[in-house]
Amino acid sequence: MSAPEETDYAVSSEFYDLLQAEPDRRRAQRWFAAAAGRARHGIVDFGAGTGIVTQVLLESSGVPVHAVEPAAAMRTVLMSRAAALGADRRARLTVHPGRAEDAGLDAVADLAVAANVVGCVEPAARRALWRAAARALVPGGMLLFDPPPSVVPDGVEDLAGLGPVRMGSDSYRAEVTRVPDRGVLRMVFDYRVERAGRPVRSVREEFPMWPAEAAALAAEAAQEGLEFVTAPLPDLLAARRPLR
């Protein structure tokens, strides 16, 4: 998903898989693999990014998978990942290069996922995501997603860094900071590349996040045709398209 205040991920797409692919893959397997294995109609991956979650969904299921990713930089990595898949998995994958609401997906899936997405879109785009998910799911179909932060912290927070990861003679890492800014959180990623202990490159990218409590999300989703239900894991939220 994208919104006017969001970046195009042009900086982070270069470093994302090197620094985050393995933990993201393990988390995707824990969050979504079992549900994907139960899918019988299809799966939608909203905000597919570089395709780490998409690949887990393909590996865990035998149904068509729709990957929705509007950012060209992230989608380029996703397409490269797809090119390396076996022909049978590529035959089940469709990539949609736009926003969730522009993908035109209508009753194509009994499972939809949105990993690291709901907190990263402004409220209007979040409501559009609920509508797109309700439309994409068959009656009884489920949307699984990780919740955004519920509140804005009082001050700047230094989060766990990424890396270092060695590649050849270089070391890659990122420092991650969460900065409150007029009701929005700014996620600041400072990427560093060192060679023999000396700086080679230093680049930064920032992403806005919109905190929201679960009750507010549930009310929003209900207005767009989804009802919150008990999630299969405590670190996920779940919404279902009603059977009626």
Image (tube, grey):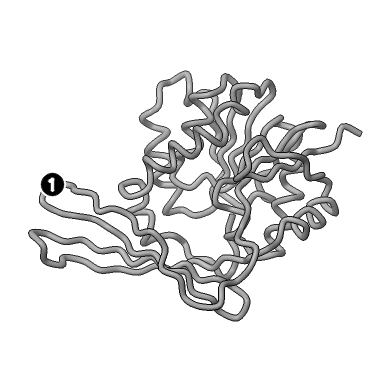
Hey, which quadrant is residue 223 in on the image? bottom right
Q: Where is residue 219 in the image (x, y as percent from the top left)?
A: 82, 56
Residue lying at the far right of the rendered structure: 244
User: How many discs appear?
Assistant: 1
Query: Which residue is drawn at the image coordinates 60% and 45% (left, top)?
Result: 235
Left or right: residue 220 versus residue 111 is right
Query: Which residue is drawn at the image coordinates 11% and 59% (left, top)?
Result: 195
Q: Where is residue 66 in the image (x, y as percent from the top left)?
A: 59, 35
Residue lying at the far left of the rendered structure: 196
The relative height of residue 182 versus residue 69 in the rendered view (above or below) is: below
Q: What amino acid type is highlighted by mark number 1?
A: Gly
Q: What residue sits right under mark 1 in the picture?
A: 168
Badge 1 marks a residue whose secondary structure is loop
Query: Which residue is drawn at the image coordinates 44% and 43% (left, top)?
Result: 24
Q: Where is residue 79 in the image (x, y as percent from the top left)?
A: 42, 39
Q: Quadrant of the N terminus?
A: bottom right
Left or right: residue 142 versus residue 21 is right
User: Is 2 or 170 nearer to us in this picture?
Assistant: 170
Hey, which quadrant is residue 92 in on the image? top right
Q: Position of residue 140 (x, y in %)?
A: 80, 31
Q: Quadrant of the C terminus?
A: top right
Residue lying at the far bottom of the rendered structure: 182
Left or right: residue 231 versus residue 228 is left
Q: How crowded is mark 1: few (under 14 residues within 10 Å), some or many (20 or more)?
A: few
Query: Which residue is drawn at the image coordinates 52% and 44% (left, top)?
Result: 48
User: Is 160 or 134 nearer to us in this picture?
Assistant: 160
Left or right: residue 34 versus residue 80 is right
